[in-house]
């Protein structure tokens, strides 16, 4: 079998003639981390306009960066993991060896390792690249040619940009972005029209799901918030993945028939296009939250066990509701570090009230109409 087999990549950008440098970026897995890598790639492209830039991503989370103009190639690395975006393409040792061989055949000059794991640094050195720049974490510094301090007291996206800064690359901006097609935008419009939502309506998108239900704000509180929002003239809709459908069916009646149910009814790309049409997003700490930040819409993000300092929405139009307990942030080993509430939530989540969140909405969304809200 040839080395190229089982090595999945997608060419995105026509490379410039006379390319002198080949650069590999390792930041695979998770929607949120994938979105947060975009500013790194944009600044890298500005510094290396003629380089061939390849980005190793997970197949599932790569959906959110379709159309990105800053890389020439997406390379899919897909080992078996417990994470939702794992499809297990590279399951066996032979699969992994073929992947590495194919990576080496590309003759990369430099690798940026934005993941902190030891295994990602091993991929970097096995790629054959002479320069390897990344975080000095997990005892892997000896595998890198340039070590970068990882900081827990700043946003993850800034940590990524610190890798560029440490390598002498000028960072000129740090905004998030994504790209949707005209077809996806039209599909989003049709979904809203079919639901009877006119373009004149102000839409609030709710995302009440979390990768671990214990860390999410309770469904009952989202439903109460939806009722308050509708009373103020907003249209409320609930977004979620097909995997969220069963959970939502159990609580659908709490949200009332007036709330538009789009849980599992559109793919991730159309969900992204829908976000651009919303007046506000309210949701848990999740990948969809980061997409809402990239859509640059007003948003209120709800944080429990994890600190928004490091993983909060990166947007000037965002507010994070967070209750800083002595144990915060925690390791999220529910419930070995704290006692659960009757709703099986930690105290930091239960401490966020419906009134707290609604107050943020009122202050943030229609500031020129604050007096109109009750």
Image: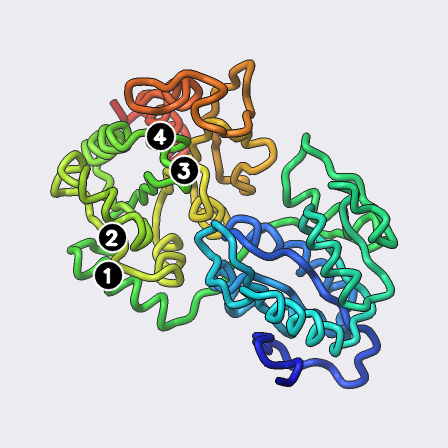
Q: Which mark is residue 217?
A: 4
Q: Which mark is residue 137?
A: none
Q: Which residue is mark 2?
A: 262
Q: Nearest the camera: 373 or 105?
A: 105
Picture layout, residue 284 above or below residue 182 = above
C-alpha separation, residue under disc 1 versus residue under disc 2: 9 Å
- Tag 1 residue: 191
The local crowd at label 4, few if under 14, some if 14 to 19, many if 20 or more residues have their Cα within 10 Å, is many
Quadrant showing the C terminus: top left
Percent from the top left, x then y, of residue 163?
A: 77, 49
Measure the C-alpha gap from mark 4 to mark 1: 27 Å
Q: Secondary structure at mark 2?
A: strand
Does residue 19 appear to the left or right of 313 in the view shown?
A: right
Vertical comparison of 150 with 76: above or below: above
Query: Which one is in front, 21 or 83?
Result: 83
- In primary-sequence order, the first of circles 2 and 3 is 3
Choose top left, top right, bottom left or bottom right for residue 181: bottom left
Front-most of 226 and 266? Answer: 266
Quarter of image, res 205: top left
Residue labelled with disc 3: 212
Q: Residue at x 41, y 42 (%)?
A: 211
Per the model, the C-alpha gap separating discs 2 and 4 is 19 Å
Position of the N terminus by quadrant: bottom right
Reading the chain from its start, which is encountered first: label 1 or label 3? 1
Q: Are marks 1 and 2 in contact (CB under 8 Å)?
A: yes
* Discs 1/3, front: 3
Q: Position of residue 133 (x, y in %)?
A: 80, 54
Q: Could you give the CA–CA distance between mark 2 and mark 3, rounded to whole angstroms?
A: 21 Å
């Amino acid at each position: 079998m040839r080395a190229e087999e089982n090595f999945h990549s997608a060419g995105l950008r026509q490379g410039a003639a006379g390319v002198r440098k080949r650069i590999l970026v390792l930041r695979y897995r998770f929607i949120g981390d994938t979105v947060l890598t975009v500013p790194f790639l944009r600044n890298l492209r500005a510094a290396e306009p003629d380089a061939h830039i390849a980005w190793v991503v997970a197949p599932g989370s790569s959906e959110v960066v379709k159309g990105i103009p800053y890389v020439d190639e997406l390379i899919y690395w897909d080992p078996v993991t417990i994470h939702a975006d794992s499809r297990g393409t590279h399951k066996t040792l032979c699969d992994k060896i073929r992947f590495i061989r194919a990576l080496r055949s590309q003759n990369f000059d430099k690798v940026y390792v934005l993941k902190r794991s030891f295994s990602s640094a091993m991929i970097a050195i096995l790629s054959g690249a002479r320069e390897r720049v990344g975080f000095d974490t997990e005892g892997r510094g000896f595998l890198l040619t340039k070590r970068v301090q990882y900081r827990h007291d700043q946003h993850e996206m800034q940590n990524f940009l610190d890798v560029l800064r440490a390598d002498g690359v000028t960072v000129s901006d740090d905004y998030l972005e994504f790209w949707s097609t005209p077809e996806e935008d039209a599909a989003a419009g049709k979904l809203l029209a079919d639901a009877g939502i006119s373009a004149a309506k102000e839409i609030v998108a709710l995302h009440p799901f979390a990768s671990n239900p214990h860390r999410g704000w309770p469904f009952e509180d989202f439903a109460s918030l939806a009722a308050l929002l509708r009373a103020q003239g907003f249209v409320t809709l609930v977004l979620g993945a097909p995997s969220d459908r069963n959970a939502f069916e159990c609580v659908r009646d709490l949200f009332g028939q007036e709330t538009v149910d789009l849980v599992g009814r559109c793919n991730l790309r159309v969900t992204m296009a829908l976000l651009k049409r919303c007046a506000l997003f309210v949701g848990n700490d999740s990948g969809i939250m980061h997409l809402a930040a990239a859509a640059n819409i007003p948003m209120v993000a709800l944080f429990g066990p994890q600190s928004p300092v490091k993983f909060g929405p990166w947007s000037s139009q965002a507010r994070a509701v967070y209750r800083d307990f002595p144990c915060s942030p925690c390791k999220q080993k529910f419930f070995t570090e704290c006692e659960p509430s009757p709703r099986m939530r930690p105290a930091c989540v239960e401490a966020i009230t419906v009134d707290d969140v609604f107050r943020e909405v009122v202050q943030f969304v229609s500031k020129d109409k604050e007096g109109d809200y009750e």
